[in-house]
Amino acid sequence: MKLAVMQPYLFPYIGYFHLIYAADLFLIYDDVAYKKRGFVNRNNVLAPSGVTRFTVPVPGASQNKLFSELEFSEDVDKVLKTIEHSYSRAPYFENIFPIVRETLKFPDRSIASVCKKSFEEIFSYLDIEKNIKKTSEIDYGRSVNARDRLIALCQHFGADSYINAPGGRNLYSKQDFLEKGIDLKFVDSLPVEYYQGGVEFVPNLSIIDVLMNCSPEEVKSFLRRYELA
């Protein structure tokens, strides 16, 4: 069984979805420290005027708190207007905007819950079954270092393969995992390009951009554009 673990990000770029797609079980890592600067609560979309960033506020955000201790603000109308303005003429707007709206208005405002909602809605739209859980709801060994926590999660679910984002190459040794009977792999995204309505392609925008411009079959083909090494 292949396991992947990653901190929650709101409508991240397609590389994040490669990680979910490659795993049999995907865990949202929400019992670790919040990342105040980054793409946890923000991302980029393509408006008529060019690349535009949307941000959902996280009241009381602090790197001294866990993801599970923080919530997204309910003030999402500006974000919804930005996305609507950016994609109202996109070919799949009528399919995707309700998913975005339902996610951003989700009553459970915890960061992981909103992100989990988005992942589940997107994979449901694509007719792909995925098993997604939050680490804060799992009973496993937390009082160890980062590497051993991941190993503990693998052992908890009986995973014999752990898939990590490419940045983990600087943090984790394949040998350390192999000694515990776990095959450590890294997911490397391959280039994805599609028509965005303009002349020059802009890569690595929010998954919203992919979904708005591409058919479900095209998106599914993009999800397969990765390598495990």
Image: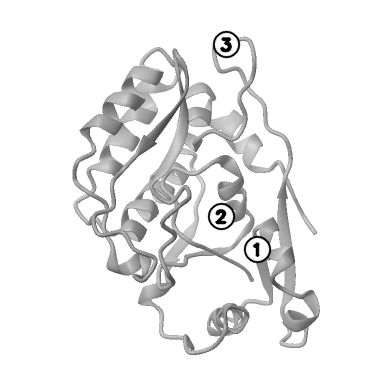
**Tag 3 secondary structure:** loop
Q: Which residue is found at the position 24% from the left and 38% from the top?
A: 76
**Tag 2 secondary structure:** helix
Badge 3 crowding class, 10 Å Cα cut-off, few under 14, some 14 to 19, many 20 or more, is few
* Relative height, residue 23 to residue 100 (above, below): below
Residue beneath disc 1: 164
Find residue 203 and name its label: none
* Relative height, residue 131 to residue 79 (above, below): below
Q: Quadrant of the C terminus?
A: bottom right
**Tag 1 secondary structure:** strand
Q: Which residue is found at the position 31% from the left and 43% from the top?
A: 56
Residue beneath disc 2: 20
Residue beneath disc 3: 198
- Of residues 173 and 207, the one nearer the viewer is 173
Q: Earlier in the sequence, mark 1 or mark 3?
A: 1
Q: CA distance from mark 3 to mark 2?
A: 29 Å
Q: Earlier in the sequence, mark 3 or mark 2?
A: 2
